[in-house]
Amino acid sequence: GDSVTQMEGPVTLSEEAFLTINCTYTATGYPSLFWYVQYPGEGLQLLLKATKADDKGSNKGFEATYRKETTSFHLEKGSVQVSDSAVYFCALKDNFNKFYFGSGTKLNVKP
Amino acid sequence: NAGVTQTPKFQVLKTGQSMTLQCAQDMNHEYMSWYRQDPGMGLRLIHYSVGAGITDQGEVPNGYNVSRSTTEDFPLRLLSAAPSQTSVYFCASSLQIPGLAGGGAGELFFGEGSRLTVL
């Protein structure tokens, strides 16, 4: 079945460091891919998305590119801030609109 | 805009008690779902619905019931609570776009969560 695998955390970075959170997926058909962010005590919010191969999703300085050849959707940000501290979830949506989530990666950014 | 509204936000139950977590959305979304979030396990799908009158099981359905009598509401029922059901529960909905490759870009919209403790 379809699935999403993302790197385990926590990831601890200093402010202004470069961030990469790896995400790979297994799917049949043509899934859509998403990154969600969960700030402490809140629900999940959509961060960015991509619906087809080679699409790049971007928002708030975060980027991820849908790579069909490597089945990946890695999240990147050039310079993280303390306010980016949160849990990040990679997810895919299959052709039946069913969502699959990764286990989440906690990011801690220190001043 | 209300979006997805969950109630209650916090609940403490004793083993064997029953309760219903309420979920309502005002976006006319056909697809609604319930997830539980446990430490180190990410989100696990409990039940989902693709429209009024249609429900199906997700990854961890045991101990939970759902119904979908209207497009707006999707309550989750615990008939006899167990300590293993201590968790944070999230309701989520999306605009279903059948027939499009990948289902279109309809992302999931989440409620703020309901923290349930079963003693």
Image (tube, helix red, strand yellow):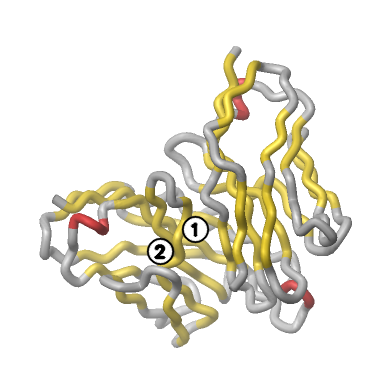
Q: Earlier in the sequence, mark 1 or mark 2?
A: 1
- Left/right placement of residue B98 relative to residue B90 reads right
Q: Residue furthest front?
A: A70
Residue nearest the observer in this picture, B93 or A6: A6
**Where is A40 relative to B117, above or below?**
above
Separation of residues labelled 1 and 2 (CA atoms): 7 Å
Q: Position of residue A74 (x, y in %)?
A: 73, 45
The numbered dot on residue B23 is: 2
* Residue type indicated by callout 2: Cys
Chain letter for mark 2, please.
B
Residue nearest the observer in this picture, B90 or B74: B90
Q: Residue furthest right?
A: A54
Q: Quadrant of residue B70?
A: bottom left
Does the residue at mark 1 contact the one at mark 2 (Cβ under 8 Å)? yes
* Residue type indicated by callout 1: Val
Q: Quadrant of residue B44?
A: bottom left
Residue found 34% across the figure and 56% down from its top: B7
In which quadrant of the rendered image does the N terminus of chain A lie?
bottom right
**Residue that carries the numbered disc 1 in the rendered image:** B4
Chain letter for mark 1, please.
B
Q: Residue furthest bottom?
A: B53
Q: Secondary structure at mark 1?
A: strand
Residue found 55% across the figure and 26% down from its top: A108
Q: Position of residue B60 (x, y in %)?
A: 38, 68
Residue nearest the observer in this picture, B104 or A107: A107
